[in-house]
Amino acid sequence: MNHRLKQTLQLIDQANAGDPKDGVEALYSQRMLETLHTFNPHASEPLTLACYAQHVCRWKLIRKDYPAGLTGYLTWRTDLAKLHANILAEAMQESSYSEDDIERAGNIIQKKKLKTDPEAQTLEDVSCLVFLNYYLDAFASKHAEEKIIDIVQKTWGKMSDKGHQSALALTLPPHLQNLVGKALA
């Protein structure tokens, strides 16, 4: 790992050090990076950094501060993506990345041109894989089966064929395998 990349990852970790949930976002960053390395071992630095910064300082924008419903949710998600992109840009600038690399990472993390930009799609695939592998069980414990199936279907719809193959290769507990099976039936 080169010096600039390492320094930028450390700056993202420093930004996440203020996480009031005691390291939740730092753990998410690690899971994103590990999953990316498995999914795409030759990922570019802008993609690697976008994956790592996917939830940087997420606690700064709270969902309940936005209106209920789909419009409020989408506004919150858009504002989060801009927050993540700005924090990432500052870290990359401090690490002497070029403006082109900073712009590229910003476009990836904001998932611009999602279905036509392979790196933005990779970020989406990786975030979906992280959700399924690490967070689906906690989500499932709080929601009715119908809601879980709906979320798995929506997650699946965001993924590429390569993402689908990786998701099917995950080793999920039997109860989650069953829910995923129902969602995909």
Image: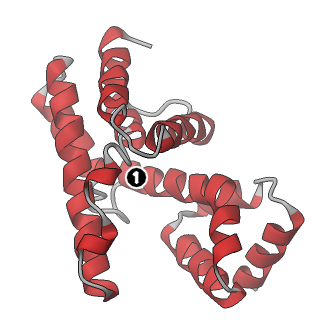
174 over 48 or under it: above or below:
below
Q: Horizontal and vertical percent for residue 22? A: 48, 39
Occupied quadrant, residue 95:
top left
Q: Image check: 20 left or right of 71?
A: right
Q: Is residue 33 visible?
A: yes
Amino acid type at image mark 1:
Pro
Q: Residue at x 68, y 54 (%)?
A: 133
Give the vertical position of 173 relative to 20 (above or below).
below
3 w.r.t. 83: above or below: above
Helix, strand or loop at disc 1? helix
Specify the farthest residue to the top: 3
Where residue 120 appears, x then y in whole percent?
Answer: 36, 53
Q: Nearer the viewer, residue 67 or 131?
A: 67
Residue occupying image coordinates x 23% and y 65%: 78
Location of the N terminus by quadrant is top left
Q: How many marks?
A: 1
> In the shown orientation, is residue 133 left or right of residue 51?
right
For the residue pair 89 and 114, the one nearer the viewer reads as 89
Q: Quadrant of residue 65?
A: bottom left
Q: Residue 16: where, in percent of width, then height?
A: 35, 35
Q: Quadrant of the C terminus?
A: bottom right
Circle 1 packing at 10 Å, graded few (<14), some (14-19), many (20+), is few
Which residue is under mark 1? 118
| Identity of the residue drawn at 45% across and 46% down | 21
One can see residue 162 in this view: no
Q: How is colour applied across the structure in the image?
A: secondary structure
Residue placed farthest to the right in the image? 174
